[in-house]
Amino acid sequence: MMNQRIPVVLTLLNLLLLCGLALDRVRPAFAKQNASPVLRGRALEIVDAQGRLRATIGVLPSTTVDSKRYPETVLLRLIDPRSGPVVKIGAASNGGALGLTDGADRGVQVFAHDTGSFIRIVDRAGRERVIRP
């Protein structure tokens, strides 16, 4: 008689634990009420399910290229996994820029700088057209 009570008690205990765990999963999840309202960092990278980089946003330091000085820039890149960045949006102290490309330096670039604004278009054949106001 005592030998039959132990398995029954253990079975009931397991059933209670199972019900408790099932009820715990049914409760809706709520975000912390004291969560930080701001995400801070030096850069953000987003990757796809295969771990490939698909988007970045970061602050690029000022630099000099071919004796031309470029100011510190915030740059957002949206990246195609096959051809690289296809959308770029930049903001600097001297203005902003938007670039839409096919990954092979063909596409449209819009510049709004303190020295002047223009649109640069490169077609499939590599012909370039610049439109200025």
Image (cartoon, rainbow, N blue to C red):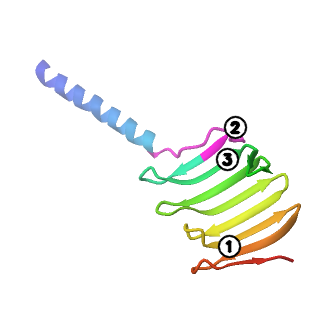
Q: Quadrant of the C terminus?
A: bottom right
| Residue behind mark 3 | 58
| Residue behind mark 1 | 108
Q: Which mark is residue 66?
A: none
- Name the spot of residue 46 as percent of width and height, x first: 55, 50
- Name the spot of residue 126 as percent of width and height, x first: 60, 77
Q: Measuring 44% from the left and 49% from the top, which residue is drawn there?
A: 51
Q: Residues within 10 Å of mark 3 (few under 14, many from 20)?
A: some
The residue stretch that appears in magenta: 26-44
| Residue behind mark 2 | 36
Q: Distance between the residues labelled 2 and 3?
A: 21 Å
Q: Earlier along the polypeptide chain: callout 1 or callout 3?
A: 3
The residue at the far front in this view is 66
Q: Earlier along the polypeptide chain: callout 1 or callout 2?
A: 2
**Element at label 1:** strand
Instruction: Judge left or right: residue 16 versus residue 75.
Output: left
Q: How crowded is mark 2: few (under 14 residues within 10 Å), some or many (20 or more)?
A: few
- Name the spot of residue 9 as percent of width and height, x first: 23, 26
Q: Measuring 69% from the left and 37% from the top, which residue is drawn there?
A: 36
Does residue 1 appear in this view? no
* Residue 28 or residue 87, whichever sits in front: 87
Q: Mark 2 and mark 3 in contact? Answer it, CB < 8 Å.
A: no
Instruction: Judge left or right: residue 67 versus residue 4.
Output: right
**Element at label 2:** loop
Q: Measuring 60% from the left and 72% from the top, which residue is drawn there?
A: 106
- Name the spot of residue 43 as percent of width and height, x first: 64, 43
**Element at label 3:** strand
Identity, as a three-letter code, of the amino acid under mark 3: Gly
